[in-house]
Amino acid sequence: MKRLLFIAFVALCICWVKMPRSHVPSRAKPMFLSHTIDDIVAGEYWCGYHTTDNHLWAINYGGGIADLTTSLPGGLAVIKATMCFNLFRVVASDGTIRQSTHYNEPLSWSQITTDSTGATITNAAWIDGYQDTYAFLRTDGSL
């Protein structure tokens, strides 16, 4: 009897492996294979990745995958991104810094217009952050 159960189990496993996967939902299939990832932006409830075509894609745990770049005003591209507490901060292609809404709110971007000294931010080149803080480098190399 044990031998018969074992043979039946092996047969079921072989059938399962050979079963066509057309029933698998499209969202479970690999996505974005045509994009080259150059930076991972890890977060708590969502994770982003920056691609070489200057797009920021986000995986929201429970909400799917989205191209966040399309919502930036004026067709701006993302040069560098960082994750802060459940939101993204990015250096946009015009040298400004933009901040997204939190992962569980409708997506929109606001501009961070001044630095901690009150100087206008127009020449950002790089950004990194953690929790509610961030630091950025300007194109002239100053912090």
Image: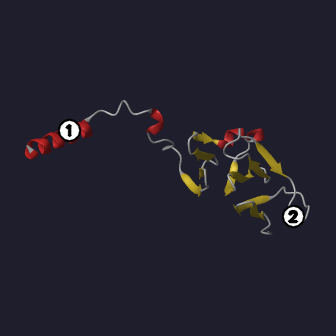
Q: Position of residue 79 (x, y in %)?
A: 69, 53
In this rendering, is residue 76 above or below 26? below
Asked if residue 17 lies left or right of residue 92, the reply is left
Q: Position of residue 66 (x, y in %)?
A: 60, 40
Q: Which mark identifies residue 12?
A: 1
Nearest the camera: 4 or 49?
4
Q: Residues within 10 Å of mark 1 (few under 14, many from 20)?
A: few
Name which quarter of the figure residue 138 lies in: bottom right
- Which residue ends up furthest to the front in the rendered image? 1
**Front disc: 1 or 2:** 1
- Give the CA distance from mark 1 to mark 2: 64 Å
Q: Quick one: quadrant of the N terminus? A: top left
SS category of the residue bearing label 2: loop
Asked if residue 64 lies left or right of residue 103, the reply is left
Q: Which mark identifies residue 123?
A: none
Amino acid type at mark 1:
Leu
Q: Earlier in the sequence, mark 1 or mark 2?
A: 1
Amino acid type at mark 2:
Ser
Q: Residue, x 73% and y 45% (percent of image)?
A: 101
Q: Give the colour scheme of this rendering.
A: secondary structure
SS category of the residue bearing label 1: helix
Instruction: Report the residue marked by disc 2.
Output: 116
